[in-house]
Image: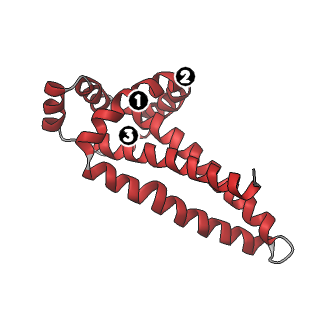
Amino acid sequence: MNDQYLFFLLIFFLAILSAFFSITESSIFSLQRYQVNLIKKKSSSGKLLESFINNPGTIIATILLLDEILNVAITSLISSKLNNLFIGRLSPEIISVIAILVTFIFILVFCEIIPKTIGVKFSRKLSINIAPIIYYINKIMFPVTFVFNSLSRYLIRLTRPLVPD
């Protein structure tokens, strides 16, 4: 298989996964309480969605952690490919700037803006289908997200005196 083809296939796959987590975040957390109550009456996903919204810390940590890993992987792969493509023709600094711009625009448009817009627009339908998947992903990621969630809670407690009531 051609290396170029494999590269684009890998970037596409990582972007789809990143888009999935962006859709997940926006579809679940844009739901209103009454929508969750309606979903609870019609679907078993309603109870999961209610638990996600009532205790968002671990779900947000899971979604953001995985999305960030995917975005960093995309950035690294594109940067490496551009570096190999332009090495000797452009300075390393210019290659870095090009890589930053290309990956920034790619991730912003295809992994963040479009997916989050879709997630908000179709939040009820998507969240019903996504909730069980995220539930199991969250269970698998629990040891890692527990650490980040605990650190986050600690930092919030630490900075609480700085925020007026």
Of callouts 3 and 2, which one flags the residue occurring earlier in the amino acid sequence?
A: 2
In the rendering, at what x and y percent does residue 75 appear?
A: 64, 56
- Name the residue beneath numbered marker 3: 161
Left or right position of 79 against 131: right
The earlier-in-sequence mark between 2 and 1 is 1
Q: Position of residue 56 (x, y in %)?
A: 35, 33
Check disc 2 and report its element: helix, strand or loop. helix
Secondary structure beneath dot 3 equals helix
Residue 86 in sight in this render: yes
Query: Where is residue 67 drawn, in percent x and y?
Result: 51, 44
Label 2 CA crowd tier, 10 Å (few <14, some 14–19, many 20+): few
Which callout, 3 or 2, points to the residue nearer the camera? 2
Residue 83, placed above or below residue 24:
below
Q: Position of residue 49 (x, y in %)?
A: 28, 30
Q: Between tags 1 and 3, which lies in front?
A: 1
- Identified at 63% across, 66% down, the residue is 100
Tell us which disc is closer to us: 2 or 1.
1
Q: CA distance from mark 1 to mark 3?
A: 38 Å
Identify which residue is drawn at 52% across, 23% down: 140
Residue at the image point whose x is 57% and y is 52% from the top: 12
The amino acid type, in three-letter code, at marker 1 is Ile
Q: Tag count in the figure? A: 3
**Viewer can see residue 165:** no
Q: Which residue is mark 1?
A: 133
Helix, strand or loop at label 1? It is helix
Amino acid type, label 2: Pro
**Dots 1, 3 in contact, CB < 8 A:** no
- Distance (Cα) linking label 2 and label 1: 17 Å
Q: Which residue is mark 2?
A: 143
Q: Amino acid at mark 3?
A: Pro
